[in-house]
Amino acid sequence: MERKEFRELTPVEEARQLINRIIARSDTEHLKIEDSAGRILAEDIFSPVDVPAFNRSVKDGYAIHAKDTYQASEPEPVKLKMTGSIPAGCSDTFFAGEGEAIEISTGAPIPDGADAVVMVEQTKGVDDNILVYQPVHINENIMKAGSDIMKGERVLRKNTRIGSREIGVLASVGMKEVPVRKLLVGIISTGNELIEPGNSLGKGLIFDANSYAIAASVEEAGAIPKMYGIIPDDGKMMEEGLDRAIRECHMVLTSGSTSAGVGDIMYKIIEDKGKTLTHGIAIKPGKPVVIGMIDGIPTIGLPGNPTSALSIFNEFVAPIIHNSLGTAPSFRTKVQAVMGTGIRSGGREELFPVGVIRGRAYPADKTSGAITTLSDADGIIEINAETEYIDAGSPVEVTMFGNVRIPDLMYVGGQCPGVDILEEETGMVFRMLNMGSSAGLTAIAGETTDIAGINMPGADGNYNLPVVRKMNLSDVVLAKGYKRELGLIFRKGERISGLEDLIGLKFKFINRNRGSGTRTVLETELDRLAKEKGISRNELTKSIKGYNSTSKTHRSVCDTIKDGRADVGFGLRNTAEESGLGFVPVTEDEFDFVIRKDLLDIREIQVFLNALRSEEFSRRLPAGIHTYEMTGSIISPF
Ligand code: AMP
Ligand code: MG
């Protein structure tokens, strides 16, 4: 198959103009009011009734003639004869004559004759009479028929999105059925590597994230998603799937198979079946996008990478849906921030995902290809093609994704159940990137995190402080955390009693990733063992089967052992026990927090430190993790 190259990328502005000319046809359907939330009104709604339908009292009191009360005062109340009582919902006819009062409840219809209601608090009942202590004016405490909504009045405009307020209005004018727009959007994921969530993940497979994320986005935009599931990378099957979706829907979105890779054929199919309007837009992430028309149905091939797919959806597909429905785009909040670090941009317009913490924006663009890029991001900044570099401290405008809650504190470092408990205890939201101790240290050095969580043994056997000193991190402090029992993890029944059992080829080991503190702790222990045996660590690890295979978290080490892909690993007691695995202790580490010195006084860090020092935190720690006399103390490395 011929390889397509992106020589001619459509500039963003041109793509936007092109998008604005695309309209998807839609139908109208009638839904029960209770099923209409989130949908778009297809017609103007005029009220068939007055609301309220009759003059009604807004207070508990007495319906009277206002002029009877004009002389009333505290020392000289006016006396009126009470002639009846009207509860709410009463349909009897009443008449209040001059000099008379009729008891009335809030919401009840005003009797003929009466032109005001005096509140019960301003009266006193005496036998069959009431005394009124204050004058009331005509219409006081009366809500006139139609004063809320008048019969024939337009209460809702067409193309309005139906939310709780609109549903309240529709119900209060007595509507039971609502005309709404029906814009069906077919959603197809492509790729041999995809499998539906809920299945077990075989080798080389990934879960289909796009179908679900795109369906949710379609719904957010006011249209109706129709999922067609996963189609393998097979031209014929893709064609059939696309045909069906085009017959059944008003618009079709595919994802995957749009780049220039061999076998990426979606663009070819769209080209064959209809008209390609553009293939490739000059933005990052996500330039491989095909926009076409097949039989009058807008058909858009989104990139496979979930981050790119959603970015392109937000920028180019949501506007088509809004134009087609006549709705205003949902309000996207913009916040002003300053760049927390400098970022480099690559000579074309970019929509750059960022996370925002306390007014500072950080790149959330780890690598493309991970949904985490997007879930770590709060919004995007637009960088124009001429900008090559944005310095730290430059002001930027962040367009937020939906209703994201901006986290209070940023944490990068080792993954640890203690940190999860700390987050809960603070009542705050952490942006938590569990990427290992080394990544935490790199981030704190680059000022891209507030806190780094580390468990790094130094050469002298002390934890963490030697590493911070070695890295020459002078603008930080070390907040001492807690101790954690680390040891060997294995299926119950295996005969493993210590590190020596790893040597030889009996058991297959699963190691932690490089950069993980826990791996460094193990290396330190192995150094000790090697010394005892008079060999080098290298020689020792060569005799450990599987030493180079790695897993990224405590939990995944346990999973690997549980399902038999390895026999033994090294990690936390607590995780082993939770996984129902055996554990023998090898050593205790110290898990500490590196905190930027300039942040020590801010509220969020204070709350964090208070939580760390609290008895409640200490009490909640699981087996194998405990606080000690140093917990919460602050050490300056220099
Ligand atoms: P493609 O455009 O088909 O080459 O896909 C680009 C990348 O996105 C590949 O790594 C795919 O595995 C991934 N990808 C494609 N479709 C999906 C999907 N529906 N969910 C998650 N990842 C996907
Ligand atoms: Mg693919």
Image (cartoon, rainbow, N blue to C red):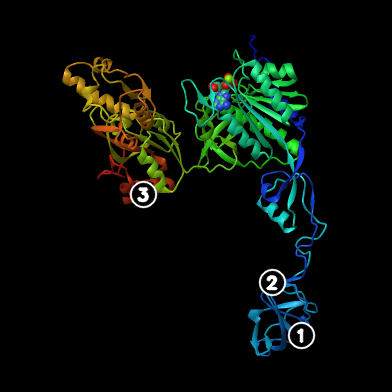
Alpha-carbon neighbours of circle 2 within 10 Å: few (<14), some, or many (≥20)? few
Across and down, in percent, residue 88 comes to: 69, 71
Give the residue at mark 1: 68
Give the residue at mark 2: 88
The residue lying at 60 percent from left, 14 percent from top is 263
Give the residue at mark 3: 610
- The answer to which image quadrant residue 243 occupies is top right
Q: Distance between the residues labelled 1 and 3?
A: 67 Å
Q: Nearer the viewer, residue 570 or 11?
A: 570
Q: Nearer the viewer, residue 534 or 606?
A: 534
Quadrant in the picture for the C terminus: top left
Quadrant in the picture for the N terminus: top right
Looking at the rendered image, the disc whose residue lies closer to the viewer, 2 or 3, is: 2
| Element assignment for label 1 | helix
Looking at the rendered image, the disc whose residue lies closer to the viewer, 1 or 3, is: 1
Horizontal side of residue 77 vs 212, given as left or right: right
The first of marks 1 and 3 along the sequence is 1
Q: What residue type is labelled 1?
A: Asp
| Element assignment for label 2 | loop
Across and down, in percent, residue 73 comes to: 69, 86
